[in-house]
Image: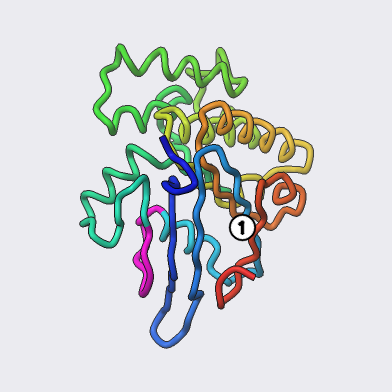
Amino acid sequence: MNTPANPVVSAQGLAKRYGTDTVFEGVSLDVIAGEFVAIVGDSGVGKSTLLNCLAGLDSFDAGRVTLCGHDLVAADDDQRALLRRRHVGFVFQAFHVLPHLDVAQNIALPLMLLGDTPADIAPRVQAMLEAVGLAGLGERLPQQLSGGQLQRVAIARALVHRPALLLADEPTGNLDPGTAARVMDLLLAQTREQGAALVLVTHSEAAARRGDRVLHLTARGFA
């Protein structure tokens, strides 16, 4: 069980540079199970890059990241990929659903990558469809859904394998204010129900205010 002494994800002294240009440095962060941390900051300061570093998708130039007790610096590419499959869910602004797969198949992808059997996958997918308010829409293709419904698919896909950490990058950025508020309600309800840690990057003040903590990222770390 994760405790404050054993966070889901921990970054210590993290720095990211492109050549001689420093994106950020001195970033330290611990996020425990069930906690919602919102990260805000100016455009171009590296908020999305920080999420990628926390997931081991992007390299970093100094510091350390520990994900569910595993040191990402010590892990090779295959080990980091397996850690992401097992422990991390992603929600993005652009949804990133696969247009040639129906809703149920999109949601099932993380379970398929983990090697679960069809008999195990079907009830999990059905439960997530009901949880996000898409019951009965499993056979629809993405182009038959609204933006709000597509983001619900993305949330269901991100949480179907019960990850310890959910990383959300501007998940309401493409939605109108009313739909955005409903999507945030759903995102928080589902992550809290599962006890997952949530790290959200956002420009939305309304979304950020709902965090347990709001951190302002600058080139010199968190202000």
Q: Quadrant of residue 57?
A: bottom left
Q: Residue furthest front?
A: 5
Q: Quadrant of residue 66?
A: bottom left
The quadrant of the image that shows the C terminus is bottom right
Q: Where are the magenta residues, as a range?
A: 55-65
Above or below, 83 against 155 in this view is below
Above or below, 63 against 105 in this view is below
From the viewer's perspective, is 29 left or right of 120?
A: right
The image position of residue 188, as x and y in percent, is 63, 35
Give the labeled residue for mark 1: 39
**SS for dot 1:** strand
Q: Quadrant of residue 53?
A: bottom left
From the viewer's perspective, is 103 left or right of 206?
A: left
| Residue in the image at 48% along x and 25% along y | 103
- Crowd around label 1: few <14 · some 14–19 · many ≥20 (10 Å): many
Q: Is residue 186 magenta?
A: no
Above or below, 216 against 171 in this view is below
The amino acid on which the numbered mark 1 sits, given as a three-letter code, is Ile
